[in-house]
Amino acid sequence: MTTETTETTESPAAPGARSLRGLVGMLAANASALSANRVLAIALPWFVLTTTGSIGKTGLVAFCQVGPYVIAQALSGPIIDRVGPKKISVIGDTVSMTAMAVAPLLYLSGQLSFGVLLALMAVVGIADGPANGAKGLFLPSATRAARVSFERGTGLAGAVERTATTAGPAVAGVVVASFGSVYALWVTAALFGLSALIVSTTLTNPVPEPHEKPADDSASYLTRLREGADFLRSAGLLRSMIGMLAATNLLDQAFMSVLLPVWAKESGNGPTAIGLVVSVFAATSIVAALVAAAVAERLPRRQVYLIGFVIGGIPRFVAMAAGVPLWAVLGVLAVGGLGSGFINPIIGAVTYELIPIGLLGRVKTLAQAVTWAGIPFGGLVGAGLVTAAGLTPALWVVGGLYLVAIVVPGMSKEWAGMRKQQAPAAGSPAQEPDAMQSDATQPVATQLVDEQRAVDQPATEMARV
């Protein structure tokens, strides 16, 4: 069975040429889709809370969107690889736009029941998960066409994501306060539609590099899904990175959903402090992501990654547990944001270097789903610790666990392979695969350095997430 997509795929750029169209289009589409998600994250709970008055229903609606999002993204990789990320992204954004436009129309006509709203949000999650996963697959070809490094491309993508995280809630707040939450849902629909338009007019499906072996198009869906899982399971460095991200995401969620609000209340700083903490951290992380886009390719990856994670993750727990004044906490968060901005460019560069284009969809979407797996449990962990021991001990415990989650995998010998990979020179023979490595999943997009090959010789290989 061959690939069903009829779209003509283009080479990213002719030799010697440089094109910024793909990179700009990818960044613009991500900005629109991510902003839609951030607006929805504020507008939807407020809409449900004000129309039903039920906290339980508010949480249920959010769950009905996020749960299908994670599951659909985890399962969509083989389909993205077969059909192509462009079609999946456009269809997903269009379906999300339609569902988000229908919800306020039904509400204004008096036809929106709670069950219908749950179904519409599940549709958004099912469509948005694969669409967002597909957008990440344009980055390798877009950066090559623009003649920039992976670090620069992922740094710019990280800056876009953090900007959307900062601006999206602000836009939602203004729209909700000025016009009502129903209109914020329409803004979300418009942003999804804009993303679909940008992808359809500026991006083309990525094609394998000349030295890459194309994936087997005749394999079944389950075979492709299993290949992605095998690739993810057997790659030492990237498996370790994903495990770290899954653990830290869970702890970050415990901080955001429980520890931070409780700290704001018990310290007397009030809810304003929550907004200040989030805004300061996001603002400096945007700056750091832009700096990373410019200089990260010249920095030692392993050291910068681990130092950035420690600075961005640990000091906030210490400052809050120690009871320092609000201004000092904000200073700590500002420095933490600077450290965190360097993390995603390195994650993205390592990921894209080690996964061949033919396997990128099924591996990367599954990896991202794994890193999200602990997020639903973060609030439960935070609430349990605060209930059992109180706020200050909970901050120390979560901070300590955060440090362990960074240091233990980060000191593994596999992390020596994080150094920048070099692609085969033009006309040179392709690297021979490891003895235990299958041809189908050999990461021929780049050559692994000898040190990485010595410590990581799995049957298959994988690569902010």
Image (spheres, helix red, strand yellow):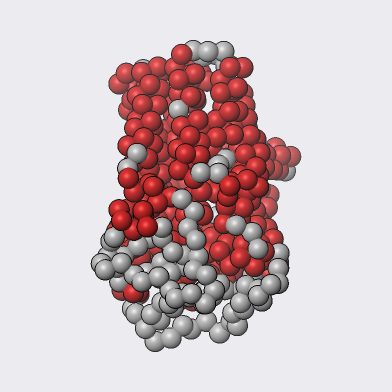
In the image, residue 130 sits, relative to residue 114, either above or below, namely below
In the image, residue 323 sits, relative to residue 105, either above or below, namely above
In the foreground, 410 or 79? 410
Q: Residue 63: percent from the left, percent from the top?
A: 43, 47
- Which picture quadrant has residue 401? top left
On the picture, is 37 further left or further right than 414?
A: right
Determine the residue positioned at 69% across, 60% down: 24
Q: Residue 108: percent from the left, percent from the top?
A: 64, 53
Outermost residue toward the front in this view:
428
In the foreground, 90 or 209? 209
Q: Residue 375: percent from the left, percent from the top?
A: 40, 42
In the image, residue 99 sits, relative to residue 264, either above or below, namely below
Determine the residue positioned at 32% across, 45% down: 413
On the picture, is 377 further left or further right than 257?
A: left
Determine the residue positioned at 49% across, 68% down: 424
**Residue 432 in view here:** yes
Q: Residue 421: percent from the left, percent from the top?
A: 47, 58
**Residue 278 in view here:** no
Determine the residue positioned at 61% across, 62% down: 143
On the picture, is 137 further left or further right than 172?
A: left
